[in-house]
Amino acid sequence: MPRPFRCRRIEQLPVYRSFSPDDITATESVQMTIDEFEALRLLDDEGLTQEACASRMNIARTTVTAIYDSARKKVADALVNGKRLLITGGHCVFEPVEIDQEIIEKGTHTMRIAVTYENGEIFQHFGHTEQFKLYDVEEGKIVNEQTVDTNGSGHGALAGFLQAVKADALICGGIGMGAQMALADAGIKLYAGVQGSADVAAKSLAEGMLEYDPDAKCDHHDHHHGEGHDCGHHHGENHECGHHHGKGLDCGHQKGDKGCRRHHGE
């Protein structure tokens, strides 16, 4: 009988997700997983021993060795052969985010939808979200609702926040590519490009009828936005997109909400 797989604890998501050579157009790419990035960060950037790295990532030292060796080979391949390096996917569970409010217990067969929330509407700036409204769905019906504060969590921590409250799906407006990748790594199904009432959107998703735009992105950057900032469209800006009908609750919900989810990069 195979040994149970242990998820790798991730303390810090990569801010930069893609690296390419400047002097050529890379025709091939190499995918490094989040746990490989974390091993490189802890061992080479922080200078930890493999024993200390294993403790921080909650895995065996031999596993650290294997992950680190794989990561180094991928970096070498990208540097020597002029390939694009992408960082996404892996067997990961993010460092828990402190939640200083009581969250409704999630049922074994419950799907939890989170919606960026402000005054009853879907808040359009993902990276500035101050509240999420959570909806628990069972057999296509909403059975519980709760509004939670993010306590100032920036865009880099929101994926960890949503994972901490056991969200399976997110409904939002515009969202940057970095945040999209972080949500995918956290196992959270994204329904972007949605506007209007949060309650109506959650009900539509529960019934498998939500219209959304899978290509909705935030491309706005100005002097207020740091590198990797992920936000929605500004108030007053028209958000035009070709909506698509959702195809049911393919959120990756797993019974019992135990353990991690495996995610392959796109």
Image: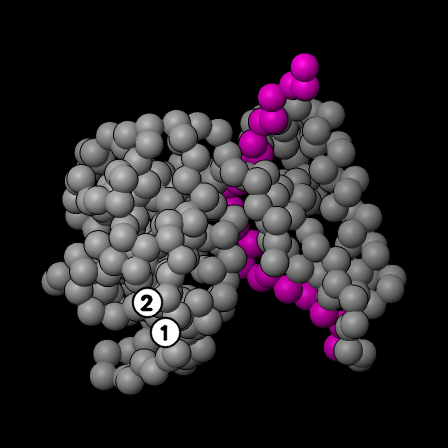
Q: Main secondary structure of the magenta part?
A: loop
Is 145 drawn above or below residue 154 in the view shown?
Answer: above
Q: Secondary structure at mark 1?
A: loop
Q: Residue farthest to the top?
A: 1
Instruction: Tell me if 29 is positioned left or right of 161 in this view.
Output: right
**Which residues make up the magenta segment?**
1-22
**Could you say where residue 64 lies in the image, as x and y percent from the top left?**
70, 32
Graded by Cα atoms within 10 Å as few (under 14), some (14 to 19) or many (20 or more), the crowding at tag 2 reads: many
Residue hosting label 2:
211
Query: Crowding near pointer 1: few (<14 within 10 Å), some, many (20+)?
Result: some
Q: Which residue is mark 1?
A: 243
Q: How many marks?
A: 2
Which amino acid does the dot numbered 1 rest on?
A: His
Q: Where does the C terminus fall, quadrant-wise?
A: bottom right
Q: Is 84 in front, or is 254?
A: 254
Side (left or right) of 99 relative to 95: left
Q: Is residue 92 magenta?
A: no
- Image spot of residue 150 (x, y percent): 26, 50
Image location of residue 262, percent across then percent down: 57, 40
Q: Residue at x 33, y 32 (%)?
A: 109
- What residue is at 61 percent from the left and 54 percent from the top? 265
Question: In the image, what residue occupies the spot 78% across and 66% down?
Answer: 28
Q: Are marks 1 and 2 in contact (CB under 8 Å)?
A: yes
Residue 97 visible in the current orientation? no
Q: Is residue 240 above or below residue 255?
A: below
Q: CA distance from mark 1 to mark 2?
A: 6 Å
SS label for mark 2: strand
Q: Quadrant of residue 163?
A: top left
Q: Is residue 239 left or right of residue 63?
A: left
Residue 173 figure quarter: bottom left
